[in-house]
Amino acid sequence: MIYTVTLNPALDRTIWVKQIKPDDTNRIENEERYAGGKGVDVSRVLMKLGINGKALGFVGGFTGQELEGRMLNEGIGCDFVRISGETRTNIIINETSTGHQLSFSERGPEIQPYELMQLIRKIEGIDNLEYMVISGSLPPGVHPEIYRKIIEMAKGKGARVILDTDGESLKVGIQASPDVIKPNIHELGRLADSELKETSEVIEAAREIQEQGGGIALVSMGARGILLVSATEQWLATPPKVEVVNTIGAGDSAVAGFVYGLVEGKPLKEALALAVAAGTATTLRPGTALCERDDVLRLVPQVEVSAI
């Protein structure tokens, strides 16, 4: 079974207003609410692609209950640890008159040590772990060492591990040799302590990270596509040109598309095409609605994959 780990999930409130007027009443035209957080997004997209899994992480308060309820209504299995704090809320405001988008993200609740250990014990008890996707930022009170710990536990159970995070969390997590890492070009640059521009520079940085234990590197480069660097293969997948409505969740959808390809036994080249198709399909949807299966499958043949 596929498990996702989201240590700092969020309830995403996406709001549409005609125009933002300072010092005046701004009337909301429409609002949508979704379960959010990077690993949660991966779980949601995998479900849309027909892959059952289970979401792990922390939830608390009424916001946490709504988040879990929304996931259950989408048919997603959950096994969250209940915490004393309140799950955070992210607010995304779309100004329809200009197309501008504003995002406000809370830090999240502080996780107590005993709550952290409840999650560890939960993971220790899993007996059907095949893939684990670990994604997102850390909530207050949690050290990046937790990512290395979880990766070691999952690999000890024979699972393939995908890590999608940034900064110190990525640096520490790599030390446990995840099978796949998914930084964007800026995150990889920070990890390599270098500004990356050319594709050759990205490949070189990815190779250096692999020597530290990084596994397959999926490096998202915006409109330029996603670069895959493994021990034996290098592929660049370029997305088709579409009318982008929203970019939130596109990276998480790409992770889900790649995992879907791996689960289906696809070669890396085809799994990469699915990743780009899923990420692109999400950009067609408003707010944080994420992609739909039909859009993903329609876009796959339009993704250009070339050897580098």
Image (cartoon, rainbow, N blue to C red):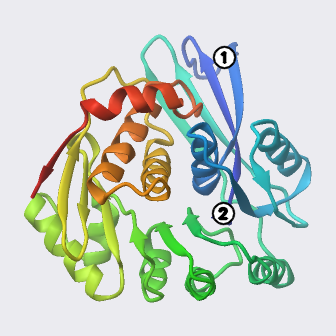
Q: Residue at x 42, y 75 (%)?
A: 179
Question: How far is mark 1 from mark 2, CA to CA?
Answer: 51 Å
Q: Position of residue 242 (x, y in %)?
A: 30, 23
Mark 1 or mark 2, earlier in chain: 2
Q: Nearer the viewer, mark 1 or mark 2?
A: 2
Q: Residue at x 50, y 50 (%)?
A: 256
**Mark 1 closeness class: few <14, some 14–19, many ≥20 residues within 10 Å:** few
Badge 1 marks a residue whose secondary structure is loop
- Say which quarter of the image contains residue 91: top right
Q: Position of residue 95 (x, y in %)?
A: 52, 19
Query: Residue 279's mark?
Result: none
In which quadrant is the C terminus drawn?
Answer: bottom left
Left or right: where 36 falls relative to 63: left
Amino acid identity at mark 1: Asp
Left or right: where 99 falls relative to 133: left
Name the residue beneath numbered marker 2: 1
Q: Nearer the viewer, residue 151 or 184?
A: 151
Q: Position of residue 192 (x, y in %)?
A: 25, 77
Amino acid identity at mark 2: Met
Name the residue beneath numbered marker 1: 24
Q: Residue furthest front?
A: 265
208 is higher (above) or lower (below) than 7 = below
Q: Residue at x 31, y 71 (%)?
A: 190
